[in-house]
Image (tube, helix red, strand yellow):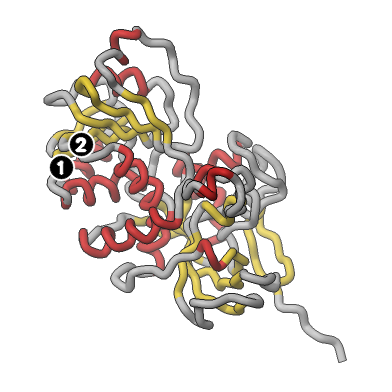
Amino acid sequence: MMTTVPMMTAMQIDAPGHPPHRVERPVPSPGPGELLVTVSACGVCRTDLHVLDGEVEAHYPIVPGHEIVGRVAQLGEGVAGFTLGQRVGIPWLGHACGTCPYCRAGKENLCDNPLFTGATRDGGYATHVVADAHFCFALPDRFSDVEAAPLLCAGLIGWRALRMAGDAPVIGLYGFGAAAHILAQIALWQGRIVYAFTRPEDEQSRAFARSLGCQWAGSTIEAPPQEMDAALIFAPAGELVPLALKSVRKGGRVVCAGIHMSDIPSFPYADLWGEREILSVANLTREDGTSFFEIAEKAGLHVATEVHPLEDAAAALEKLRAGALQGAAVLVP
């Protein structure tokens, strides 16, 4: 008697520049320390565009997606702390070696030998995914599967960027998409003043920012009402760095929150002088996740989403590229 092999559906990128297309493959089995997860929702992140365009390291062919919400379908050998059917979140950092100098110093986001979900190990544009159990999160019950998906990167990486900004009473958010609309709500809940910067033609995003409580929203070429203590840049546009430097006070910080950015043009040293700083955010730690989900639950976040069927992954990515999303796109198998 023949045994039927369980099959799964995935949207696979074969090589840089090749849009994701549907493939059928056997459902994988989790190895030691891993979980097999049935995917309920997967957010569409700008990093997925960088994987598509070959702008970040990836192992092709690859199933993208690293804002994954699903249920545990199978436990690998030695897994503790998870149960069958439990809802989990799977983020960008899919594995860290635990032995390199960065890991030993508590900086697993800088690990020398990491694996990244949806880039160097298959991700969540699929009906099933295997993940390292040590890098999966329990999720707050108050968020639906679709609402929780963008929190796994737009929320987590944004939270790390906000923490790097320090106590900054007045902050500016450059690029008002999935990450910024989440971070704006947290910063406002913390009592900060928030300014939003968008492309000059994007009045819709400025109106969205004001509706969330941002005290001012303008274009990236405008000066804010006052000098800012910190600026967080989510758009992958290097030309925003000198503009943000001009708008932060002495001792202020410009935090570049993306994994990829176009070249930063030259600027006068005078714009940096006064102990201003330019910082970058690299990946996340599990502690970022633990602290972020506690805050997300307390702050009463509203996550703006636009749902797409899994098979429409290519169209959702191009909508993100065009800046035609308000909030985050989420794929649902």
Where's residue 226, x and y in %? 13, 25
Q: Earlier in the sequence, mark 1 or mark 2?
A: 2
Residue 27 visible in the shown view? no
Where's residue 25, x and y in %? 73, 66
The residue that disc 2 covers is 168
**Residue shown at 42% from the left, 27% from the top:** 237
Residue 127 lies, with reference to residue 283, above or below; the image says below
Left or right: 86 with respect to 124? left
Residues under numbered marks 1 and 2 in contact, where contact means CB atoms less than 8 Å apart: yes
Instruction: Measure the C-alpha gap from mark 1 to mark 2.
Output: 8 Å
In the rendered image, the residue lying farthest to the right is: 1
In the rendered image, the residue lying farthest to the bottom is: 1
The residue that disc 1 covers is 192
Quarter of the image where one finds residue 290? bottom left
Residue 178 visible in the shown view? yes
Left or right: 51 with respect to 140? right
**Residue shown at 12% from the left, 25% from the top:** 225
**Residue shown at 66% from the left, 48% from the top:** 13
The secondary element bearing badge 2 is classed as loop
Indicate the amino acid at tag 1: Arg
The secondary element bearing badge 1 is classed as loop
Nearest the viewer among 111 and 47 is: 111
Indicate the amino acid at tag 2: Ala
Quarter of the image where one finds residue 203? top left
Where's residue 161, x and y in %? 35, 41
